[in-house]
């Protein structure tokens, strides 16, 4: 009898507790807005330091020697990237220090922002 009674009592007790928990507010009125934890830019908007090595305006490619691109999990290296906007390619010059944002666009690492680094 004990073998049968204990599981039944446990099932009833947890069922009652779960019903009580589910009977509460639906959380639709809770403010779930997240606030930044510091004054640093969020990792998903941060720019990385780089140097322009080569510009190929015809193909829209810019070769960069860059630091880690944490948002896409890429270590520091020198690599050619397609620029999302052709104007970025025209404004870049070999030897220039820049700050870049590279994101995966349609499966390819693509420069989505490129600005001259302040001196």
Image: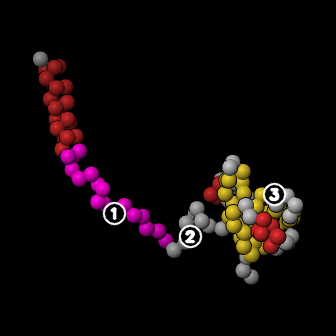
**Applied colour scheme:** secondary structure
Answer with the quarter of the image where residue 2 lies.
top left
Residue 36, magenta (yes or no):
yes
Residue 17, magenta (yes or no):
no
Q: Which mark is residue 41?
A: 2
Rounded to the nearest whole Å, what is the CA distance between mark 1 and mark 2? 23 Å
Q: Quadrant of the C terminus?
A: bottom right
Rounded to the nearest whole Å, what is the CA distance between mark 1 and mark 3? 44 Å
Q: Which residues are magenta?
A: 21-38
Q: Residue furthest top?
A: 1
Is residue 66 shown to the viewer in this render?
no
Q: Secondary structure at mark 3?
A: strand
Instruction: List the residue tagged with mark 3.
Output: 80
Residue at horizontal 33 percent and vertical 63 percent from the top: 31
User: Looking at the picture, how far across and down is residue 108, in whole percent?
Assistant: 72, 51
Tell which tag, 2 or 3, sits nearer the viewer. Answer: 3
Residue at horizontal 86 percent and vertical 70 percent from the top: 94
């Amino acid at each position: 009898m004990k073998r049968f009674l204990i599981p039944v009592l446990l099932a009833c007790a947890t069922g009652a507790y779960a019903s009580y928990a589910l009977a509460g507010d639906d959380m639709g009125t809770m403010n779930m807005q997240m606030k930044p934890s510091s004054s640093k830019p969020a990792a998903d908007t941060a720019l990385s330091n780089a140097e322009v090595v080569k510009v190929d305006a015809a193909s829209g490619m810019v070769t960069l020697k860059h630091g880690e691109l944490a948002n896409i999990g890429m270590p520091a290296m020198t690599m050619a990237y397609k620029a999302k906007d052709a104007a970025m390619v025209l404004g870049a010059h070999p030897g220039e220090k820049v700050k870049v944002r590279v994101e995966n666009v349609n499966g390819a690492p693509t420069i989505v922002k490129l600005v001259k680094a302040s001196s």
